[in-house]
């Protein structure tokens, strides 16, 4: 018997029907399913509502788009639980299973006809001005972003790499992305695309007001520290969720996490072919 946690998009009507279909299949094959209480109540599946930590599951079934996958990763908080992602999104880089194939995918998973792909997570910490200890810590599958609070102004950010000063940026913000996150916000800021099989950190400035505006691809052995300079406020966002307001002297420290995210794959999934399909790239 396997405990399966189901996390679903709370605003998509079809998510409720898919979750119920998954539960029916799982229970008929001797497994148990539960949902976080907020998901279950929003989707009208109150009988599945549970306060159990999602990390207690042996499989995480995610029904939604990339945003739902990011939420699942956040709920797992580094726990080594494989994620099977069913696509209800648009670009959907992180979801492999289409809704009509969901029960077949479950059958293949439990018969061992699959593999597990590991993706690097980013460890993000905030160290307040005058302190040596982190006041908050998060993991990101895509990115951490320092962004200006006020429109019409740049913020000044001091970047250190492995305790050595690199440079000061006057910009709208700074993105620290994983290879998985290289196709998210960093791509919009003209950062490079990196295969998610790599372990690296990608540092991309957002609209820098200076001549040096290139992204940096850093080793997974390096640590990046970004200090807020000047009087303008900065917001720290981790995988799309605002987690902290930053003031002068506050530091955001980023490095690869010890834990990783695990995704269930069926067959060989070539990243460059996924990229080609999502962007509709034509043959020469």
Image (cartoon, rainbow, N blue to C red):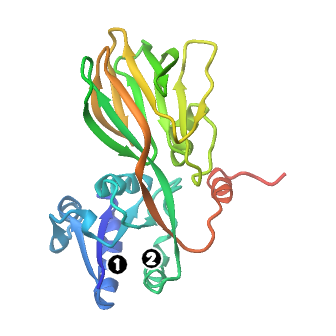
Q: Using residue 154 as the reference point, say whether residue 182 is left or right of it.
A: right
Figure disc tally: 2
Q: Which residue is mark 1?
A: 22
Q: Quadrant of residue 253?
A: top left
Question: Circle 2 sits on which residue?
Answer: 102
Q: Nearer the viewer, residue 76 or 190?
A: 76
Note whether 119 is above or below 135 in the view shown.
Answer: below
Residue 66 appears at what percent x and percent y?
44, 54
Q: Quadrant of the N terminus?
A: bottom left
**Which residue is drawn at the image coordinates 35% and 24% (left, top)?**
251
Write the residue at 43% across / 57% down: 261
Q: Is residue 87 left or right of residue 268?
A: left
CB of mark 1 within 8 Å of CB of mark 2? yes
Disc 1 secondary structure class: helix
- Quarter of the image where one finds residue 270: bottom right
Depth order, front residue of 170/120: 120
Where residue 21 sits: x, y (%)?
34, 79
The answer to which of marks 1 and 2 sits earlier in the sequence is 1
């Amino acid at each position: 018997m396997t405990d399966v946690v189901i996390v679903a998009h709370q605003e998509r009507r079809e998510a409720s029907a898919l979750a119920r279909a998954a539960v029916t299949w799982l229970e008929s094959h001797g497994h148990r399913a539960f949902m976080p209480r907020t998901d279950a109540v929003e989707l009208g599946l109150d009988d599945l509502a549970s306060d159990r930590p999602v990390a207690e599951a042996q499989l995480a079934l995610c029904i939604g788009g990339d945003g739902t996958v990011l939420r699942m990763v956040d709920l797992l908080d580094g726990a080594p639980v494989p994620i099977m992602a069913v696509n209800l999104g648009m670009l959907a880089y992180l979801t492999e299973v289409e809704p009509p194939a969901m029960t077949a995918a479950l059958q293949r998973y439990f018969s061992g006809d699959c593999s597990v792909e590991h993706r690097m997570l980013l460890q993000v910490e905030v160290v307040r001005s005058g302190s040596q200890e982190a006041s908050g810590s998060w993991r990101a599958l895509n990115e951490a972003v320092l962004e200006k609070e006020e429109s019409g102004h740049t913020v000044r950010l001091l970047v250190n790499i492995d305790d050595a000063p690199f440079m000061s940026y006057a910009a709208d913000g700074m993105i620290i992305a994983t290879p998985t996150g290289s196709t998210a916000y960093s791509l919009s800021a003209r950062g490079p695309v990196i295969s998610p099989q790599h372990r690296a950190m990608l540092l991309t400035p957002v609209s820098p007001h200076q001549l040096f505006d290139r992204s940096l691809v850093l080793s997974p052995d390096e640590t990046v520290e970004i200090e807020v300079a000047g009087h303008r406020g900065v917001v720290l966002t981790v995988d799309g969720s605002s987690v902290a307001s930053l003031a002068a002297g506050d530091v955001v420290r980023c490095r690869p996490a010890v834990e990783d995210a695990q995704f269930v794959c069926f067959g060989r999934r070539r990243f460059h072919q996924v990229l080609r399909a999502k962007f509709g790239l034509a043959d020469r």
